[in-house]
Amino acid sequence: MKGLLKRWSFWCLLGLAALALFGTRLFDALPEAEVAAPFSKPLWLDRSLPPTMDLELSGGHPAVELDWTFSAPSRFSLRVETALPAPSRFVEWTLPGGKTFRLTPLNGGVELDGRDMAFKRSLGLPPFGDASSALFPERGTYRIGLTGEGEWEGSVKIRLEGGRWGLLGTDQRGRDIAALFVAGIRVSLLVGIFATLLATFLGTSLGLAAGYRGGWTDAVIMRTVDLLLSIPLLPILMALAALWGKGLWQLILILSVFSWMGTARTVRALTLTLRDAQYIEDLRGLGAPASYILRRHLLPETLPVLLATMTLGVPGAILSEAGLSFLGLSDPRVISWGRMLHEAQSFGAFTAGAWWMLLPPGLGIALLCLVFLDLGKYLEERVDPRLRGGNVL
Amino acid sequence: MSGYWARRTGSALLVLGLVLVLNFVLFRMMPGDPVASIIDPNFSPEAKARLSEVYGLDQSLPVQFLRYVRSTLTFDFGISFLTGRPVMEELKSRLPNTVVLLGTSLVLSSLLGTWLGMKAARKRGSLLEKCVLWSGALSFSFPSFFVQLVLLMAFAAALPLFPLRGTLSVPPPAEGLPLLLDYLWHMALPVFSLVLLGFGGWALYVRNLMVKILGEDFILLARARGLPERNIILGHAFRTLLPPLLTIFLLSLPGIVSGAVITETVFSLHGVGRFLLEAVTGHDYPAAGASFFLLALLTVSCNLLSDLLYGLTDPRVRMERGGGR
Amino acid sequence: MIDIRNLSVTYGRMTSEGRGSQAAAVKNVSMTIRKGQFSALAGESGSGKSTVLMAIPGLLPPGTAVSGEILLDGKNLLALPENDLNRIRWRRIAIVPQGAMNSFTPVLTVGRHVEEVLSVHLGLSRKEALERIPSLFDLAGLDGELARRYPHELSGGQKQRAAIALALACSPDYLLCDEPTTALDVITQQGIIATLKNLVEKKGLGLLLISHDLPLAASVADRLHILKDGELVEEGDPAEITARPRNPHTRALVKALLDLEEGS
C-alpha cells in the first residue's frame, strides 16, 4: 500500500474526486448559469480586453470610480430598479477628460442597452454608432454617480460585458467553463467506474461459468465474445443510446453490456488453470459443491488480477462515454466533458477561435484516463512483479 | 490446412449472419414512427398507409425480417427516409471515402509504429524508447475527437493551411489532377490525425513483442551463426513478430472502423460513418441498418483476410484447433 | 587451436534474470581446445561452464566485463570487432545448443536455417544449398526429408540432431556443444554422443562438450576440465582425474559417484 502513496496518479485521482464532490461550491452560480458574454476569454489571457464587470449604485453607494485600462467593452447595459420614481435624479457618467453624460433619470424599471436607438440618440450618436465606445473613449478614471434632487431608494445596476471572464472563460452561451469542467468530472468518474464495475461483474460471472462448466455453456459464451470482439461496437452503442433514451444510467448499462469480453476471457483462462489445480480437485473429491468452490476458492484467486484489469478498463469506458456525448447522443441536460466538446464543435467555437472551450474537457478526459492507466499498471505489477520496469508513467 | 481456412471462413459467415439479426432487431426497435418522420402530418391516413406499404412496414415482423435479409444480401437497402434516395446509391458515393480514410491511415500508422517499435526495442533505455512508451500511453488516453478538434482549430481555423470541412471543395474543381489534389488536400488532415492517434499503440505493441523476441534463445543462436544484423532483425526477429502483429491488427479493426464515425463527423467528410450517425439520430433505419451492415462487412472481410494471412505466416496455427485465438 | 588464457568474466548489473550480483562468473580460466580432440568441461549448474562457451565466439550480453585472451590460431577473439567475429562464427566455430533451448526460429523450417548459413557464409545459391542438405542431415544421423519440417514438428532428439546438422553446415573446425544431451532419453543421448565422437575421429573436429554429467564427460572425453564456482579445479586425462582427484571438491564428487555405482 505504501507504493500507492508514491504514485502521482493516486493523489491526482484523490484531487479529482474531491473536486467532483465539493467543487461546485467553489462557484457562486450554478454551472448552467449564463454569467458573462459568450466566448469570453479566460481572465489571464488578454489583458487589454476588459473583464466582465457588474457595478451597483445605491443610496449607500451613490458613486463608483472605475480605473479603466482596457479597450471598450463589447456591450453596455444598465438597469434601474426603484420603489419610487425620482425623475429629478439622474445617473451621471463622467469621462476621464471631465466630459459628462446624463444617462437616465431614476424612474423605476428602466432598462438601457447599448444597442437601443433611443439610448444612442440620447448620447448624441448616429444610429449606427457604438454606445460602448462612446462611453469608453479612452483609458483613465471614470466616475459613475447620481446627481439631482429627490428622495430615492433602490439600485442601479450596470453591466459591462467584457471579453474576459473567470479562470477558463465562457462558452457559446456565456456559461463559466471552469464550473462546467468541474461539473463534468462527476459524469466521467461515475460512468467510468460504474460501467467498468458492471462489466467486470458480467465478465467474471460469464468467465467463471464458461471456464468451470465447460461444454455448451463455454461454447456459447466464448462464441459471443468472439462475435462482439469482431464487429464495430460504436454503431451499436449509438443505436442503443438513441433507442433507450440518453440518461446516465442507461448509458452505463449499455457501455457495460458491450465491454465485458476481455474480462470474461481472462477469468476463463485463469479458471481453466485453477480448475485442474490439485487442491481444487481434492475439494471436489471431498464433495464440495461447485458454487462453494467458485465462491470460496476460484473467485478469491482471480480477484487481484481482476482488480488490475478493471482499473485498466476504466479509460475505455470514459472514452466511450465521451465519444457518445461528443456525437450528441447524450442527455443535453447533463453536463459532461464529451458534451462540452460536442457543443464546442456544433456552436461555433471554431469561428470564434475559442480554443479555451476545447482544451479543458479534452485534457480532463486524457488526464483521467492516464490516472487510471497508471493505477492499473501499479496493481498489475503488484500481482505480477515480473512486469516491473518498462513503464514510463 | 484447408480445414483451417474452411473453419475461418465458416466463422466469418456466422458472424455476418448474427450481424444481420442484430441489425434487424436493433434498427427496427428504434423509437419514433419512421413514417411520421418522412411525411407531412397533414397527409391523409390513406396516404400514410400507402407509404407504409411502400416501405413494407405493414407486414408482420418475420415477413419483414425475411424481406430484409433477402434485400440486404442483394445490396438492395431500400429508400432512405431522410433523403428519399436509394440507400445503396448514398452508400456507393460514400464508401470509397471511408475506405481511403481508414486504409491509408491504417497502413501509414502501422508502418510508422512498427518501424519505431523495432528501433525502440533494439535501443533499450534510449530516448527513443521512452518516447515510444509515452506515445503508447498517450494514444490510449487521448480521445480521438479531441485531438482532431485541436488539429482542426490549429491547422484549419487559426492557420488556414487545410480546409475546415468536407471531402471536396464546393464547387469541386475540374476532373483529373486538380480534382485529385483537392481530394488529397481535404483528406490530409483527417488521415494525419488518425496516424497520430494510431502509431503510438502500434509502436508500443511492437516494442513489447520485439523486446520479448530479442531475448529469446533463437536470436542468440542466430547471432552465434554469424548472420548479418539485417538477417537477424528482419529474417528471424521480425518474421517471428509477424503472426502476433497480425493478431493485433485483427483485434484493432473493429475499433478503427468505429473511429470512422467520429473522424468523419469531426471533419464533415462524405463517408459511411457520418451517414450512419445522421441516420441514427434521424431514425432513418434503412440507412442506419445498411451503413452498420456495410461497416460490419468491411470488418469481417478484413478479419478473414488477416486470419488467412496468419495461417500463412505461422506454421503452428495451421495444425491447431479452429476456435478462438 | 583455441587457446583460452586467464579468462575472467563478470556480468553487469542487469542480467536477463534481473540478478544484481557483481560476482565474477568465471575466474582466471585457462584451457585449450585442439582439433581432433574431444575435450569436456564439467561442473555443477551455475559453475560458469556456459559462460566459458559463450565467451569464445563473443556472445556474452553487452555490459559484461571480460578479461584475458581467447586465441584462435594466435588471433585474440576478444579484441576482434563484430564484423570479423561474424566471419569466424559458424565458419570456424559452431555451437550445438542445449536440447532444452528454443534454438530454431519457430516460424522457419529447419532446412531454411541451413540454407541461410550456407548462403551467408559460403555464398551458395538456394538450389546448391538444397543439394547439400541430405548429406549434412545424414552426417548428423537424420533423414533429409525432415528439413522441410518446422521446429515444433520435430521430436527432442530429432531437433538436437538437426542442430548438429546445422552446426556442421559450413564445416567448422571447432564444435562447442552446450549440454547437447540434457532432457533427452538415455538411448537418444547415447546415439548423439556417438555421433559427436564419430565427428571428432573421422572429420578431425575440435570438440568441446559442456556437461553437468561428470561420468558421461569422463567416459567420452580425451581431455577433461572441471569447473567449480567459476574456477578450473581439475584438468587432464579423464581416467587420471577419476582415479586420483587433486581437488577436495572433485574428490568428494568422485567418491559420491563411486558410491552410487557400488550401490546400484
Image (cartoon, helix red, strand yellow):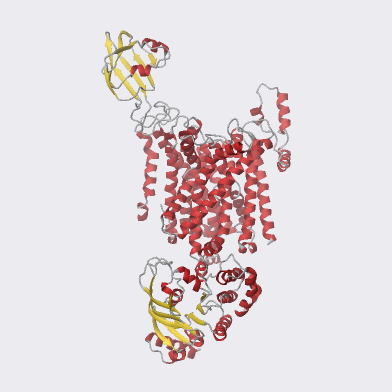
Q: Can residue B26 be seen here?
A: no
Q: Position of residue C173 (x, y in %)?
A: 52, 80
Q: Quadrant of the N terminus of chain A?
A: bottom left
The residue closer to the viewer here, A294 or C49, is: C49
Q: Position of residue C254 (x, y in %)?
A: 43, 88
Numbered disc total: 0
Is B293 situated left or right of C252 in this image?
A: right
Is B170 situated left or right of C19 in this image?
A: right
B139 is higher (above) or lower (below) than C51: above
The residue closer to the viewer here, C73 or B217, is: C73
Is A39 situated left or right of B115 in this image?
A: left
Q: Can residue B253 be seen here?
A: yes
Q: Quadrant of residue C199?
A: bottom right
Q: Quadrant of residue C47?
A: bottom left
Q: Quadrant of residue B320?
A: bottom right
B43 is higher (above) or lower (below) than C245: above
Q: Position of residue B322 (x, y in %)?
A: 64, 59
Q: Position of residue C8 (x, y in %)?
A: 38, 76
